[in-house]
Image: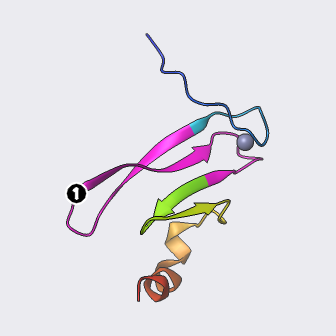
Amino acid sequence: MEQCNMPKCQRCHVGDLLPLSDFGSQGASIMYKAWVCTNPECGYNIKIRNGDIYINEPIMNGANNSRSRQNIAN
Ligand SMILES: [Zn+2]
């Protein structure tokens, strides 16, 4: 099976950066919205939201953050 070459994480040089996609409010897919290091001890991530780039935001546990995410959206 052929594997795509993912860019190496420039922080830990161990993990690869994995592109993640999301869905917008209209249900349209947003390709490669975020890139996350596959090394759990590194956790480096970069994402784009409303045209702004966010680097190394804390990774959210979605189950516990529904309230704070609403605050951000408003
Ligand atoms: Zn890394």
Residue 34 coordinates in the image, percent (x, y): 50, 52
66 left or right, relative to 41: left
> Within the image, what quadrant is residue 51 found in?
bottom left
- Is residue 33 part of the magenta span, yes or no? yes
Query: Which residue in the protein does label 1 denote?
Result: 28
Compared to residue 71, the image places residue 10 above or below, namely above
Compared to residue 14, the image places residue 55 above or below, namely below
Q: Residue at x 53, y 77 (%)?
A: 65
Along the viewing direction, whichever of 29 and 63 lies nearer the viewer = 29
User: Which residues lie in the magenta part?
Assistant: 18-45
- Is residue 25 part of the magenta span, yes or no? yes
Q: Residue at x 77, y 47 (%)?
A: 41
- In the current view of this chain or complex, which residue is farthest to the top? 1
Compared to residue 71, the image places residue 34 above or below, namely above
Along the viewing direction, whichever of 31 and 51 lies nearer the viewer = 51
> Which amino acid, mark 1?
Ala
Ligand 1 lies in quarter: top right
> Within the image, what quadrant is residue 24 found in?
bottom left
Judging from the image, what secondary structure is the residue with disc 1 in?
Answer: loop
Q: Residue at x 53, y 57 (%)?
A: 47
Residue 64 coordinates in the image, percent (x, y): 55, 76
* Residue count near mark 1 (Cα–Cα under 10 Å), binned few <14, some 14–19, many ≥20: few
How many numbered marks have been drawn onto this rendered protein structure?
Answer: 1
Residue 42 coordinates in the image, percent (x, y): 76, 47
